[in-house]
Image (tube, rainbow, N blue to C red):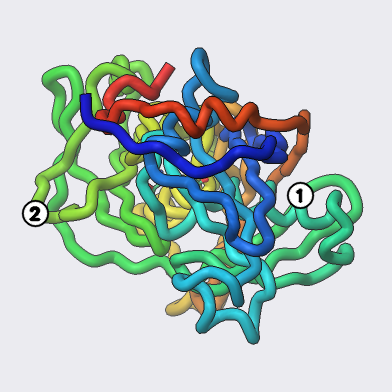
């Protein structure tokens, strides 16, 4: 059995948090001293053999991470985001709110406005003492038309939306039509998404109000996805004939997910703002044996 061995010997601090039940293992590591290969991340996110999470937030000073050094002047902290299978992602909308909540709780930032470096660029976060957190998520891009999503033998046309990370948004009549997203990932044409894709299924709930389910790249079905909710809101707006960059009128959608509610506003300049909760629920220490043991390279069994 192929595997890797990590080099930690001392206990490693962690916290657990979630945003609309999209849950994360948080590893504070200001100096980027903790070795976190994909296999170690998959172990930590495993819901039976590890701590459990849809993803992992590695909290590192931008100046100390090669992927973030260029952003260090703008944003002191880098969200090194990993999916549950250990793969890197450009951005995580729920994760960045929880990341900011952690920084606040640890006394590393003040309430108010802060900037967080991500692989998808620097994100501006507004953090109150309690309650919801608002993130400026950037603008949506629409790289390609004509994507199809297939699951359980059904197919739907989907809109290709990029929120820093890739999404396919399919409007369906009933969220149950998305079937069992854990066992059957709804892949779209590989050519449209060479690096994989997050897939959202959306139904109407009312005026400027939708509900969705999501299958996340690298994690399977989750109870919420912040970038996915933003992709859904802009897709719904375009379907409804609303484009704030044309009309100059901002548009707001309420997006219900299995794990809670997110409110998404697209401003006249195209900037998308997402507001939702961010909660820390636990903290403790990881037994280094979990990371130092040789673990399989295969990541196929990490989704509980
Ligand atoms: N849950 C996240 C998205 C996490 C990354 C995604 N799975 C990807 O690989 O792009 C969110 O809240 O945005």
Residue that carries the numbered disc 2 in the rendered image: 191
> Callout 1: helix, strand or loop?
helix
Of labels 2 and 1, the one closer to you: 1
Label annotation for residue 102: 1
| N-terminal-most mark, 2 or 1 | 1
| Vertical placement of residue 235 versus 119, above or below | above
Where, by quadrant of the figure, is residue 251 drawn? bottom right
Which residue is at the front of the view, 266 or 197? 197
Query: Residue at position x 73%, y 43% from top?
Result: 278
- Tell me the crowding category of disc 1: few under 14, some 14 to 19, or many 20 or more residues within 10 angstroms, Cα based: many
Does mark 2's beta carbon lie closer than 8 Å to ligand 1? no
| Vertical placement of residue 241 versus 184, above or below | below
Query: Residue at position x 11%, y 47% from top?
Result: 190
Residue 290 in the image: x percent, y percent?
A: 53, 26
Residue 218 in the image: x percent, y percent?
A: 34, 38
Residue 142 in the image: x percent, y percent?
A: 29, 65
| Vertical placement of residue 1 versus 128, above or below | above
- Tell me the crowding category of disc 2: few under 14, some 14 to 19, or many 20 or more residues within 10 angstroms, Cα based: few
Answer with left or right where residue 192 lies relative to residue 129: left
Which residue is at the front of the view, 200 or 77? 77
User: Split into 4 quadrants, where in the image is the N terminus?
Assistant: top left
User: Can residue 241 be seen at all in this image of the molecule?
Assistant: no
Q: CA distance from mark 2 to mark 1?
A: 38 Å
Residue 281 in the image: x percent, y percent?
A: 77, 30
Answer with left or right where residue 67 lies relative to residue 186: right
Query: Residue at position x 18%, y 36% from top?
Result: 187
Where, by quadrant of the figure, is residue 21 drawn? top right
User: Split into 4 quadrants, where in the image is the C terminus?
Assistant: top left
Answer with left or right where residue 229 lies relative to residue 147: right
> Callout 2: helix, strand or loop?
loop
| Vertical placement of residue 161 versus 8, above or below | below
Where, by quadrant of the figure, is residue 246 drawn? bottom left
């Amino acid at each position: 059995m192929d595997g890797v061995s990590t080099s930690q010997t001392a206990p490693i601090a962690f916290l657990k948090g979630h945003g609309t039940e999209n849950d994360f293992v948080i590893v504070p590591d200001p100096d980027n001293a903790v070795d976190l290969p994909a296999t170690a991340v998959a172990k930590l996110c495993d819901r039976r053999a590890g701590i459990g999470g849809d993803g992992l937030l590695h909290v590192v000073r931008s100046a100390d991470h090669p992927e973030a050094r260029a952003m260090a002047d703008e944003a002191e902290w880098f969200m090194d985001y990993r999916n549950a299978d250990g793969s890197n992602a450009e951005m995580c909308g729920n994760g960045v709110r929880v990341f900011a909540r952690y920084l606040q709780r640890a006394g590393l930032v003040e309430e108010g406005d802060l900037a967080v470096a991500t692989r998808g660029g620097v994100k501006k976060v507004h953090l109150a003492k309690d309650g919801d957190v608002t993130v400026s998520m950037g603008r949506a891009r629409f790289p390609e038309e004509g994507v199809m999503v297939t699951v359980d033998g059904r197919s739907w046309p989907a809109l290709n939306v990029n929120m820093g990370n890739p999404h396919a948004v399919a409007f369906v009549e009933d969220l149950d039509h998305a079937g069992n997203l854990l066992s059957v990932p709804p892949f779209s044409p590989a050519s449209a998404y060479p690096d994989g894709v997050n897939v959202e299924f959306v139904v109407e709930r009312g005026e400027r109000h939708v509900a969705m389910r999501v299958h996340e790249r690298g994690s399977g079905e989750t109870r919420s996805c912040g970038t996915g909710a933003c992709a859904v809101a802009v897709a719904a707006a375009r379907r409804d004939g609303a484009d704030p960059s044309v009309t100059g009128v901002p548009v707001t959608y309420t997006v219900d997910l299995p794990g809670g509610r997110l409110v998404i506003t697209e401003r006249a300049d195209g900037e998308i703002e997402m507001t939702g909760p961010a909660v820390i629920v636990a903290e403790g220490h990881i037994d280094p044996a979990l990371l130092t043991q040789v673990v399989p390279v295969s990541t196929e069994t990490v989704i509980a």
